[in-house]
């Protein structure tokens, strides 16, 4: 019996997942793409059919409604649900999967629409219900979180007895030609970037003002870029699972134009997430801004340049200090040529497909709710090499770094 795969969400990432599942149709079997706006699913299905010859079914679903989700999952008779809608839908989709007894995967942790805060608490709290339903939930199977967690697990397995410090370094050097646009959902992106920074050291979380810590990092194949410390969700699980860790931080690159626009929008209140009254109507400034900004899915054909995301880890092996850098470089234009999406959607969608593939093939198995670094990294790393995200390991001298002083 062929497997049945249900993908929820037809944005930039949903497009890549649909393409990549179709390219691995032997594993994914009958594929259905469901989302709030069915016309977007149909447009993706048309492109997938033209480029790969694989036919996808499409459906409408409001993923805020557990009842609607249950109906769709039952109708599809899904073996797995790949959630690439928005983080706001994580809990409803997880609850629907529990009711139907179906495995679950997502790429971003739950956020409440009214609070700009993300954490794993509510998803981890569903571990018992997943175990009881005899199903598996894989959380954060995108690039970061996702591949970055797997890179850490790989470093721990093959290079270190103990990792002491990890810096996750995320560079998008793509240029879409607009003065200001976000590479994935604007609301989620701007909420993440305008929040306070936070990193973990010796057991404590240390909070910083937004963008207060900067370093210039020399990214292989890209060059030196200003990189700012942000809080990022994979750190919450990595501090639990990486042995001997003393410090973990996350840095992301931003250009000057992006930061100036963001500061200005913030100063005038356009990043607000509370309703305001406008001419007798209630509007949420951030939602209105998202309406004005270019649709991230439309950036694909115009984005040029590369992404480079990796981890820089220091620790001990056989009593000797060791430093490694594991990274992956993608080219926006090549991504677009392959699946009609730019690099940020591509680098998220491919790992989502790989996580689901390993689950369907039984290579990553378990009952309950898991983060990526809890599984053997090797099969995932092998898939990255052949599914479009080849990576490299650079071994450095113990005191070497790529920070430009
Ligand atoms: P988009 O905004 O492009 O797409 C989101 C899709 O979800 C849209 O098709 C949207 O429908 C659909 N959707 C939203 N609400 C509902 C709902 N209630 N019911 C059904 N469908 C709904 O986002 P992206 O594709 O850029 O991002 C998708 C996910 O990937 C997000 O969770 C994001 O945080 C995550 N991500 C993870 C990364 C990682 O590395 N881990 C990096 C980048 C993104 P409609 O078309 O009607 O608006």
Image: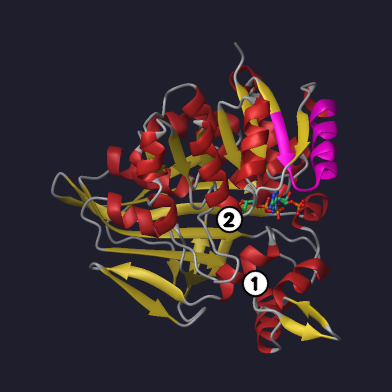
Q: Quadrant of the N terminus?
A: top right
Say whether disc 1 or disc 2 marks the residue closer to the N-terminus: 2
What segment carries the magenta color?
32-50
Residue 194 percent across, percent down from the top left: 57, 76
Q: Is residue 89 left or right of residue 216?
A: right
- Residue in the image at 63% along x and 54% along y: 86
As measured in the structure, the alpha-carbon distance from the residue carrying label 1 to the one carrying label 2 is 26 Å
The reply to whether residue 22 is visible in this rendering is: no
- Residue in the image at 49% along x and 48% along y: 140
| Relative depth, front residue between 73 and 322 | 73
When asked about the image quadrant of residue 370, the answer is top left
| Relative depth, front residue between 398 and 40 | 40
Question: Which mark is drawn over residue 255?
Answer: 1
Q: Is residue 317 above or below residue 402?
A: above
Mark 1 CB within 8 Å of ligand 1 = no
Mark 2 CB within 8 Å of ligand 1 = yes
Judged from the image, the secondary structure of the residue bearing numbered disc 2 is: helix
In the image, farthest residue toward the front = 67
Residue 47 percent across, percent down from the top left: 83, 34
Residue 57 percent across, percent down from the top left: 77, 28
Q: Residues within 10 Å of mark 2 (few under 14, many from 20)?
A: some
Q: Which residue is mark 2?
A: 87
Foreground tag (1 vs 2): 2
């Amino acid at each position: 019996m062929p497997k049945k795969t249900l993908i929820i969400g037809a944005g930039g990432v949903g497009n890549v997942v649909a393409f990549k599942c179709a390219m691995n149709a032997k594993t994914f079997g009958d594929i259905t793409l469901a989302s709030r706006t069915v016309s977007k699913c149909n447009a993706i299905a048309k492109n997938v059919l033209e480029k790969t010859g694989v036919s996808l079914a499409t459906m409408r679903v409001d993923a805020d409604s557990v009842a609607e989700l249950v109906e769709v999952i039952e109708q599809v008779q899904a073996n797995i649900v790949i959630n690439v809608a928005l983080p706001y839908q994580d809990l409803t989709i997880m609850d629907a999967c529990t009711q139907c007894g179906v495995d679950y995967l997502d790429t971003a942790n739950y956020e409440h629409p009214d609070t700009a805060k993300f954490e794993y608490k509510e998803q981890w709290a569903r571990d018992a219900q997943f175990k009881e339903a005899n199903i598996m939930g894989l959380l954060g199977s995108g690039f970061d979180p996702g591949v970055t967690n797997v890179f850490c697990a790989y470093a721990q397995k093959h290079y270190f007895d103990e990792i002491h410090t990890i810096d996750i370094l995320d560079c998008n050097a793509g240029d879409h030609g607009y003065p200001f646009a976000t590479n994935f959902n604007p609301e989620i992106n701007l909420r993440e970037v305008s929040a306070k920074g936070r990193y973990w050291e010796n057991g404590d979380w240390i909070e910083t003002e937004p963008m207060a810590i900067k370093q210039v990092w020399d990214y292989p194949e890209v060059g030196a870029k200003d990189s700012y410390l942000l809080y990022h969700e994979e750190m919450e699980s990595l501090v639990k699972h990486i042995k001997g860790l003393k410090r973990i931080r996350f840095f992301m690159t931003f250009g000057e134009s992006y930061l100036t626009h963001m500061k200005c929008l913030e100063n005038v209140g356009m990043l607000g997430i509370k309703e305001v009254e406008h001419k007798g109507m209630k509007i949420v400034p951030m939602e209105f801004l998202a309406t004005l900004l270019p649709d991230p899915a439309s950036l694909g054909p115009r984005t040029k340049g590369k992404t480079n995301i990796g981890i820089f880890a220091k620790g001990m092996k056989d009593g000797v200090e060791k430093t490694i850098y594991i990274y992956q470089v993608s080219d926006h234009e090549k991504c677009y040529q392959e699946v009609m999406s730019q690099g940020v959607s591509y680098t998220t969608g491919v790992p989502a497909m790989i996580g689901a593939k390993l689950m369907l093939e039984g290579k990553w198995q378990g009952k309950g709710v898991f983060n990526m670094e809890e599984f053997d990294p090797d099969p995932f790393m092998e898939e990255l090499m052949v599914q479009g995200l080849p990576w490299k390991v650079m071994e450095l001298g113990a005191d070497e770094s790529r920070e430009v002083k």
